Amino acid sequence: MVGLKPPEVPPTAAVKFISAGTAACIADLCTFPLDTAKVRLQIQGEVRIPRSTSAMEYRGVLGTLSTMVRTEGPRSLYSGLAAGLQRQMSFASIRIGLYDSVKQLYTPKGAESTGLAARVLAGCTTGAVAVACAQPTDVVKVRFQANGAMPESARRYSGTVDAYRTIAREEGVRGLWRGTLPNIARNAIVNCGELVTYDLIKDALLRTQLMTDNIPCHFVAAFGAGFCATVVASPVDVVKTRYMNAGPGQYRNALSCLLALLMQDGLAGFYKGFVPSFLRLGSWNVVMFISYEQLQRIAVLARTPQS
């Protein structure tokens, strides 16, 4: 047995909620540089208003990371981390921690197992609710990650709190919810790609007895979930990143951002930053799901009286 054995008593919704947020923060700490590289590659080549005089060019994941370290210092890899962790504690706690509870709500009474439709509906529901609650933290995270690509004199924010204040002052409170619709679309897809795929792969591995309910099983299921999520969500993710990073007046709405991207870069533009997206989402899923499963078991063991 690798890792803690499954508890006899299932974890409560509160345990899942807290474990999901904590596990997502652990995963963010491990993979945040890859997320920053993904954002930089996705916004590269974007026509900005006003136009930037920066000629910085990023080539590939390692090239982006090395360029950032060389020109901005190692700390730039974790630019926006505070907003990222704030996002995960509110966002992941809802979309991942409440998934099982919502899935049970959609499962007909008396059903022997949960069907695919109930899983998909649960993933879409928790993903949408999570975005509605945590969108401002995502906007600030994306702005901060893109901020370092600009010349120092043109950088818009000096800190996380300043970013919240500046966006609210210059763009109104609605600015903090910029890109909510594409983000809901993205996270409905990502949630289904991640949680539903993880759920199905894990169930299949356990049902066919190819693996037992331990870390290797969680690793395989999480890796498959990360790949599926990246493939289906990358186009929406690129549009979401560009739209949330845009200044006032650059795009009328998410659709105009999508059309501008399509005209400028073609269909290939929707998969800009795919490699760092997969490296980030794949590794994030592995770290998060393994941490999530183990944290739940630790919490249950801590609450169980020792005989």
Image (cartoon, rainbow, N blue to C red):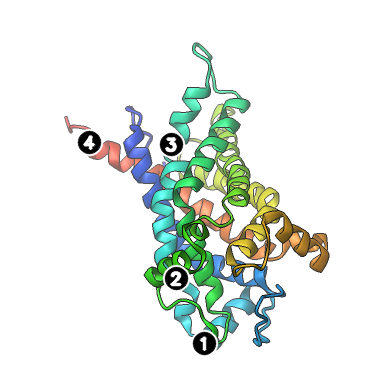
The residue type indicated by label 1 comes to Glu
Task: Report which residue position mark 2 lands on.
Answer: 166
Q: Which badge, 3 or 2, comes first in the chain's sequence?
A: 3
**Residue 73 in sight here:** yes
Crowdedness near tag 1: few (<14), some (14–19) or many (≥20) residues, C-alpha within 10 Å? few
Q: Which badge, 1 or 4, comes first in the chain's sequence?
A: 1
Task: Report which residue position mark 3 lands on.
Answer: 98
Kindly indicate the quadrant of the structure image that contains residue 63: bottom right
Cα–Cα span, label 3 and label 2: 33 Å
Cα–Cα span, label 4 and label 2: 44 Å
Instruction: Single out the mark in the foreground, 1 or 4.
Output: 1
Task: Report which residue position mark 1 lands on.
Answer: 152
Q: Name the element at disc 4.
A: helix
Horizontal side of 189 relative to 12 (left or right) equals right
Horizontal side of 37 relative to 292 (left or right) equals right
Q: Is residue 208 above or below residue 161?
A: above
Residue depicted at 57% across the width and 61% down the height: 280
Q: Quadrant of the N terminus?
A: top left
Q: Is residue 266 above or below residue 89?
A: below
Cα–Cα span, label 1 and label 3: 41 Å
Cα–Cα span, label 1 and label 4: 51 Å
Q: Name the element at disc 1.
A: helix
The numbered mark at residue 303 is 4
Q: Name the element at disc 2.
A: helix
Q: Quadrant of the C terminus?
A: top left
